[in-house]
Image (tube, rainbow, N blue to C red):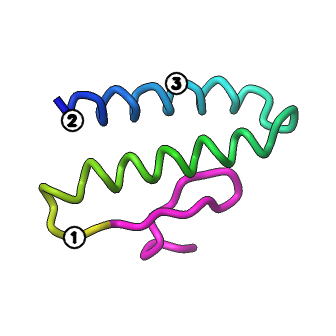
Amino acid sequence: MERFVNTANIDHYRRLISESRLDPSSDQQRHKMLLTLLAEEIAKDRKPTDRVAVSYEVIDGCLVPKDQRP
């Protein structure tokens, strides 16, 4: 059940982010918050199965794994 909720949250945040990308300048704080929430949900989703937690950060409005910085 927890995995279902986690997957539903990831899908929901991705949808909200794609909508906010149409005009991110209107509410940049909300866009950043959504990216942070998505990163947290992805980390929760990967923790039990991958054994290696991946940390994400927001760079130029995009979600990037911390170990793959430009």
Residue sitting nearer the eye, 31 or 18? 31
Marks 3 & 2, CB-CB < 8 Å contact: no
Does residue 49 appear to the left or right of 61 in the view shown? Answer: left
Cα–Cα gap, marks 1 and 2: 19 Å
Residue sitting nearer the eye, 69 or 5? 5
- Indicate the quadrant where residue 55 lies: bottom left
Question: Tag 3's secondary structure?
Answer: helix
Residue pointed to by mark 2: 2
Cα–Cα gap, marks 1 and 3: 26 Å
Q: As displayed, is residue 68 above or below residue 4?
A: below
At label 1, which amino acid type do we have? Val
At label 2, which amino acid type do we have? Glu
Does residue 32 appear to the left or right of 36 in the view shown? Answer: right
Residue pointed to by mark 3: 15
Seen as rendered, the residue at the extreme right is 26
Residue pointed to by mark 1: 52
Give the foreground label among 1 and 2.
Answer: 2
Specify few, some or many for label 2: CA neighbours under 10 Å numbering under 14, 14-19, or 20 or more. few
Give the foreground label among 3 and 2.
Answer: 2
Residue 19 on the magenta segment: no
Q: Which residue sits at x=61%, y=59%?
A: 58
Seen as rendered, the residue at the extreme front is 1
Rendering coords of residue 24 (x, y %): 78, 36
Does residue 70 appear to the left or right of 41 in the view shown? Answer: right
Rendering coords of residue 6 (x, y %): 30, 36
Quarter holding the N terminus is top left
Mark 1 or mark 3, which has the lower sequence index? Answer: 3
Q: Which residue sits at x=21%, y=35%?
A: 2
Q: Which residue sits at x=43%, y=52%?
A: 40
